[in-house]
Amino acid sequence: MKLKPLAALLVVAGLFSVGIGIGRQHGFSLKSFFQADSKAPPHDFPVLDPSPPSKIRIPAIGVAAPVHGVGKDKDGTIATPSLNLRNEAGWYREGPTPGQFGPAVIVGHVDTKDKPAVFHRLKELTPGAKIEIVRRDRQVAVFEVNSVEQFNKDHVPVPRVYQDFSRPSLRLITCGGAWVGGETGYADNVIVFASLVSSHKA
């Protein structure tokens, strides 16, 4: 994938894949996007200890899927599950775990060449919908959708998506918009912004 200008750091890479197009030549690391500028602020909402996610449930759109960790592709983008795992989601393991301070990022395919995939109905979510993330420590982190937004891949709001450490939050990312083919695939990203509201034992 050819790198976009610095102003458009976050892109979706490849066919159906969700990525962060950050180039080494720009002089910063992908991991730095998930570091708070200062210590966590005082809070009156739940905060969980680190623990990787194992499942995601979104009752409003019928999602109940395994989650596994993903890293980076060779081009610096966030890797996505194999197309053979179209009904699984991928948590970016170099960022926060769901329930920690900061934005935990979970990506998934919208479709494959001939079938819908795990996040096919993501754009149908509305504010107030609940997202449950089952973690390996047997805690369930419950998030509430704040907004569902669609951005051209060249105009993703980087700080809002990846650098908000005001509270524990979640970002679900998939493809959307028109199919343009080539290295771009779909023209847009669909991004769900959600905040942690409660937790309970699995």
Image: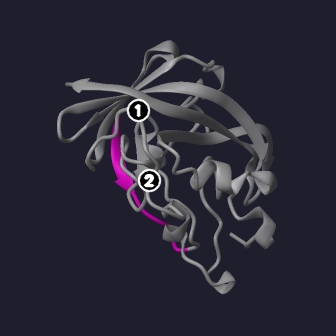
Q: Position of residue 116 (x, y in %)?
A: 56, 29
Residue 90 appears in the figure: yes
Q: Amino acid at mark 2?
A: Ala
| Residue 137 higher or lower than 200, as above or below | below
Q: Position of residue 187 (x, y in %)?
A: 79, 46
| Residue at the outermost front position | 42
Q: Is residue 103 left or right of residue 137?
A: right
Pointer 2 residue: 40
Q: Is residue 107 left or right of residue 146?
A: left
Q: Secondary structure at mark 2?
A: loop
Q: Is residue 101 left or right of residue 191?
A: left
In the rendered image, which quarter is residue 22 located in? bottom right
In the rendered image, which quarter is residue 148 located in? top right
| Residue 63 higher or lower than 70, as above or below | above
| Residue 53 higher or lower than 132, as above or below | below
Q: Position of residue 94 (x, y in %)?
A: 41, 62
Pointer 1 residue: 44
Q: Quadrant of the N terminus?
A: bottom right
Other-residue count near label 2 (Cα within 10 Å), few / some / many at <14 / 14–19 / ≥20: few
Q: Nearer the viewer, residue 108 or 164?
A: 164
In the rendered image, which quarter is residue 56 located in? top left
What is the distance, in whole Å, between disc 1 and disc 2 at their CAs?
12 Å
Q: Nearer the viewer, residue 45 or 84?
A: 45
Residue 21: assigned label = none
Name the residue located 42 percent from the left edge and 47 percent from the top edge: 90
Q: Amino acid at mark 1?
A: Asp
The magenta span reads 66-74
